[in-house]
Image (tube, rainbow, N blue to C red):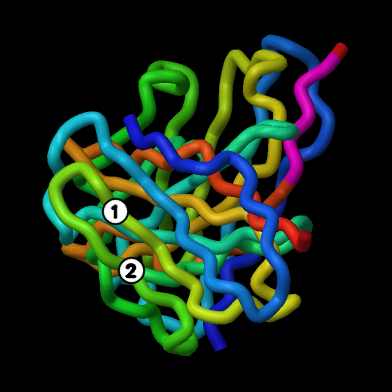
Amino acid sequence: VLAQSPGTLSLSPGERATLSCRASRSISSSYLAWYQHKPGQAPRLLIYATSNRATGIPDKFSGSGSGTDFTLTISSLEPEDFAVYYCQQYSRSLYTFGQGTKLEIK
Amino acid sequence: EVQLVESGGGLIQPGGSLRLACAASGFTFVDYAMHWVRQAPGKGLEWVSGINWRADHIDQADSVKGRFTISRDNAKNFLYLQMNSLGPEDTGFYYCAAGRTLSYHFAFWGQGRLVTVSS
């Protein structure tokens, strides 16, 4: 199980966003990814293997963590960053997503 | 340009069957495991099923075991999801996704296809 917090995060453009993802048991850092999802669009891979940015993802997005606690940080929010963010893990041949954090404009 | 384009879906009565297809282009299809991920209305993402490049290893979520079957045609670069015994809980957007072999994430995604199970 992956638990994301907070459920909703209200911030202003230019602010820093910190999103949390907690696993119910320790997972390999290779098995943790983050996605951005906007309404009506395909989800987009941001970070894989905890801290590796996917192709074309700007360096304002960064991932960190180990064991059971992982974090996605967006250094300076821009209007296009407001979306729902999901963490995802792989374990025992199954894939699980967190329930998502909605990042909204304050 | 990488493209994953889903087709099929629509409105189906409870207990019915439906097949989704996903046309892949812009990448080497056989280098990737393929997956289906869905999103129920107002809910988060849920992985449904995955198939490796040779189609000799398939994994599924417990929620669809015995009802859904994933398959692929490497000659045509297509992924399929046969869905049987559909229930209202299967309603949602279904996304086709690709993950490079030996990776544990979904690098490419389709735009999704809506499946509505209702009488």
Q: Please state which amino acid type lies under the numbered disc 1.
A: Phe
In the rendered view, does A76 fall on the left or right side of B111?
Answer: left
Q: Residue at x 16, y 54 (%)?
A: A66
Q: Tell me the quarter of the picture where residue A44 sits.
A: bottom right
Q: Which residue is mark 1?
A: A70
Q: Residue A33's spot in the image, x, y percent?
A: 34, 59
Q: Residues within 10 Å of mark 1 (few under 14, many from 20)?
A: many
Q: Report the amino acid beneath label 2.
A: Gly
Q: Is residue B75 visible?
A: no
Q: Is residue B119 above or below residue A15?
A: above
Q: Secondary structure at mark 2?
A: strand
Q: Is residue B4 toward the left or the right of residue A95 in the image?
A: right
Residue ID for mark 2:
A63
Query: What's the CA distance linking mark 2 and mark 1?
Result: 7 Å
Q: Give the x, y percent position of residue A43.
A: 58, 61
> Quick check: A61 left or right of B6?
left
Whichever of callouts 2 and 1 sits on the residue coming sooner in the sequence is: 2
Residue span colored magenta? B114-118
Where's the N terminus of chain B, which quadrant? Answer: bottom right
Quadrant of the image containing the C terminus of chain B: top right
The prevailing secondary structure element of the residues shown in magenta is strand
- Residue A30 placement (x, y as % from top left): 17, 60
